[in-house]
Amino acid sequence: MAPSPTPRRSVRVRRRQEALPSGLPVEQLLLAAVAGTSDVVLVVGRDRAIRYASAPLATQFGYDPAAMVGRSLSWLVHADQEAQFDAVLTQAELRPGSSQRIEFGMWHAQERWVITEAIVTSMLDDPAVQGIVLNLRDVSDRRDLEAALRHQAFHDALTGLANRVLFTERVAHAVTTNPDEGSVAVLFCDLDGFKSVNDTQGHAIGDRLLCLVAERMARCVRASDTVARLGGDEFAVLLEGQGVAASAELIAETIFRTIAAPYMLDGREVTIGVSIGIAVTTGVGDTADGLLRNADLAMYKSKASHPHRWVHFESQMHAALLDRVQLVGELRHALARHELTVYYQPTVELADGRIVGTEALLRWHHPRRGELTPDHFVGLAEDNGLITEIGEWVLRETCRQAALWQQWAPEGSLFSMAVNVSARQLTPDLVQAVRSAVDAAGLPPAALMLEITESVLIERTGDMMALMQQLKSFGVRLALDDFGTGYSSLSYLSRFPVDCLKIDRSFVKALGSPSSETELARTILRLSESLGLATIAEGIETPAQYAALRDMGCRYGQGFIFARPLPPHGIDEMLGGRLFAHASPVPMHATYEVPRQSAVRLPR
């Protein structure tokens, strides 16, 4: 037969009575201190000895409640907090009925410290208790979560660096506490070439690259400095203390060299660069927002002034920023407003002056600034994500125009249309864009020649090889633009499916006079011939240059000696008049001019 509940209750009561001072009513104490709570309840006397411990002490802290009675409370408290804890108990003695909250480290039976929250209530004047009551709970998990959330709020989730919020706060604190001139410096760092890696190799590889960059940057600075990832591929560094103006350039140089070293990602070697802007406090009205803005402006100047590694902020940069922001806003609407148009520069066969094709050159007929060439706005389009839309429009328009000009191609050949392709366009999406433009225009694919700079091929060898093979698979031709100005590693040429080399105008300029560039041009022509590639010389302006190239065996050329870039009707007139057909070198010196036209509105 199971025992009745009465004897069992008597045993529980007797055990509790053994853990309490003689004569203290058990029921009153339980109601006052224990009822309705899952917290650990301790009753401590004036001597700091534990007089009562509730059952949850075993589950939360691993101690037998009965075994703890009579022991000093102080041995459970972290040594660094004993004085603070004792002061709270002293206050409880002096102020009966008062209640205080304290958080401290408590020693767990499993030999570890846990963060413990205690509500300390003085019940010394309560006849039923006559002690100080502590309601305890382990808040370690809660504090860990709060710390994690706090870290997440102020740190970049991918790299673990400070984020924009924390960095801005630290800059504000630094500017306030270091008011002297040159005592605070901010470096804005924007990666060069990261987007192409991210677009072509995938976001997973891009994320790994950002983490590696973060690790390298952290090694470039002092322990007292702050490195932050502001978002995307933008990083920043905060330097504080006397003399940071002088050390800022040294740190910038270290960052530049460190970031530029190759990275190995999935067995591929990847290289990127970094543009750095430096802003230093002036000691007069400095603010965090102003310092950050100035560093950002200097960074954009650095990017535009390649190959400068870093640029210090100068006051005139602010006006340039406002102008840039306005131009970007206007560029967003330029296509819809029919302000963009394509001009064409003839490509001529040097032997007889016959026009065999054209190169497409984008122009922006700005309503206030006049005609703008690509160097004024293509960089803006790339930085602000507009280049894809603009580039696809250029492909559609040039393919349409090239289809019309096929009537002028000699029998058995094609009239060539060369189109420059931005590095930002060189993604798998380009293949479909090119195919759509060619198909819509009814243009033979071989009539379209895409021009790519050699630096892109070297930096993105694996991805570019696959992309070029896809383009070649349906007949498009490929040219290497500005050859000789970049890496000029001749060994890679045979690896890429290139059809044509374009000799940069810097080599052509020196022709006709003794110089090393003349011999380089000759070498490039011999190399091109040995690889079975066509060669086009750019920037031919004088009869001497023309004659030198023809004598060297260069077959094709472009330049002002033949014609400046013209709107489509200008090329129509030249083709219809057969201006260069069977011409000798002498007449070709006269540049064919078409009167300046207003913005040519081309159909989308």
Image: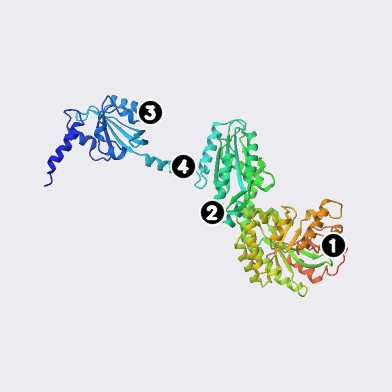
* Foreground: disc 3 or disc 1: 3
**Residue corresponding to mark 3:** 79
Relative side of 195 to 155, left or right: right
- In the image, residue 471 sits, relative to residue 65, either above or below, namely below
Q: Position of residue 75 (x, y in %)?
A: 33, 29
Of the two numbered discs 2 and 3 on the same chain, state the one appearing first in sequence.
Answer: 3
Q: Are marks 2 and 3 in contact (CB under 8 Å)?
A: no
Say which mark, if any, is on residue 550.
1
For marks 1 and 2 on the same chain, the one whose residue lies earlier in the sequence: 2
Does residue 208 show up? yes
Question: Marks 3 and 1: CB-CB under 8 Å?
Answer: no
Q: Secondary structure at mark 4?
A: helix
Q: Amino acid at mark 2?
A: Ala
The quarter holding residue 601 reads bottom right
Residue at 61% over, 66% down = 432
Horizontal relation, residue 108 to residue 413: left or right: left
Front residue of 157 and 7: 7
Instruction: List x then y, in percent, for residue 363.
Output: 70, 59
Q: Amino acid at mark 1?
A: Arg
Quick check: marks 3 and 4 in contact, CB under 8 Å?
A: no
Under circle 1, the secondary element is: helix
Q: Is tag 4's residue or tag 2's residue first in the polypeptide sequence?
A: 4
Front label number (4 vs 2): 2
Give me the disc on residue 204.
Answer: 2
Residue type indicated by callout 4: His
Residue named by callout 4: 151
Q: CA distance from mark 3 to mark 4?
A: 27 Å
Q: Looking at the image, can residue 595 be seen?
A: no
Select label 3 or label 4 by which is in front: 3
Give the mark toward the camera: 1 or 2.
2
Q: CA distance from mark 3 to mark 1?
A: 91 Å
Amino acid under disc 3: Ala
